[in-house]
Image: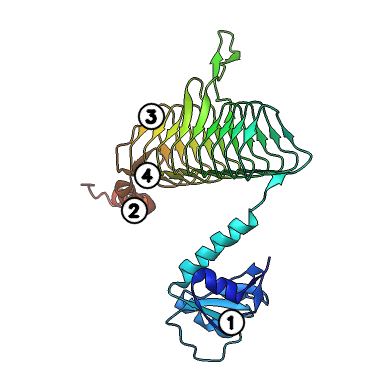
Amino acid sequence: MKFKASQIAEILQGEIVGNPDVEVDKLSKIEEGSEGSLTFLANPKYTSFIYSTQASICIVSNKFEAQNEINTTLIRVEDPYKSFSVLLEYYNQVKLSKSGIEQPSFISESATYGEGIYVGAFAYIGKNVRIGKNVKIYPNAYVGDNVTIGDNVIIFAGSKVYSETVIGNHCVIHGGAIIGADGFGFSPGENGVYKKVPQIGNVIIEDHVDIGAGTTIDRATLGSTIIREGVKLDNQIQIAHNVEIGKHTAIAAQTGIAGSTKIGENCLIGGQVGIVGHIQIGNNVKIQAQSGIGRNVKDGEVLQGSPAFNYGDYNKSYVVFKNLPKLSQKLHQLDKNNIPNE
């Protein structure tokens, strides 16, 4: 889809300097701009590129003053970075504005859905599914029986939403995510053979939740695994049965959370963090990447290490860790010289 400079200026309420009819159909960095692309200049250290960029349109600040000849059409705005972000959001909405039901796909006769739905080819929607308005379910997605999906939800290609899952409004589930698979529940017998414990709960995902590609959220053994409003989950995260994650917590990739752990609100959890089961993590907690959490965590703690401990203490200790070889040499020299070690 092509956009004229005049159309972009209208969206951004900006002023055009140059050709209002020039068209663009792609986005680019200013140093990589090519004909037909739109770029922006926000960071002063990239100013030199505006004189050489081949981009057709460049968004700049109202305060920008050219020192040399410029070949690209300019759109002057108050805040170039913010304006470019607005365009990215607009572009994404246009790109994702699919509708209709492609074939072949399967929708159970007992399923219901609101207006503006999109169902991609080879998608499956099971019995008694309830789907709200403006929901987009991309090709090869699976929605199991008795699932409830709110309004303005996007389920990308290859995602699997198992039965009884409840998804709120304005959620995004990226490709390959699996919501509602069985929790890791097995009971060891006397002969060492494990017997599966039925997992009959579900997963509840509240409004404005983003779930990254390849992330898995297990259904509860009993009750619900709950992802509260505004939670942001990166790619390839494992969330076990009966876990609860509080509002507006963000978790980076490859983190694993064991069963029945409760995580508070507004927490920031880095990548590759391991959290044991059946513990409580408070609100506003920060956990650095690759930490191992094996205890309850109070509100506001900042942790690092495995097992994790106070972030400030960790940094102080790390200075000692790095100097251990030197300290060892000194001790060895003291012993060699028969000087008492005090």
Type of amino acid under label 1: Thr
Q: How many labels were placed on the picture?
A: 4
Q: How far apart, in angstroms, are the residues tagged by discs 4 and 3?
A: 17 Å
Mark drawn on residue 266: 4
Q: Residues within 10 Å of mark 2 (few under 14, many from 20)?
A: few
SS at badge 1: strand
Q: Which residue is mark 3?
A: 279
Closest to the camera, between mark 4 and mark 3, is 4
What is the x, y in percent for residue 104? Answer: 79, 39
Q: How far apart, in angstroms, are the residues tagged by discs 3 and 1?
A: 58 Å
Of label 2 and label 1, which has the lower sequence position? 1
Residue situated furthest left in the rendering: 342
SS at badge 3: loop
Observer-nearest residue: 238 or 164? 164
Q: Which corner quadrant of the image does residue 107 belong to?
A: top right
**Residue 240 visible within the image:** no
Q: Which residue is mark 1?
A: 73
SS at badge 4: loop
SS at badge 2: helix
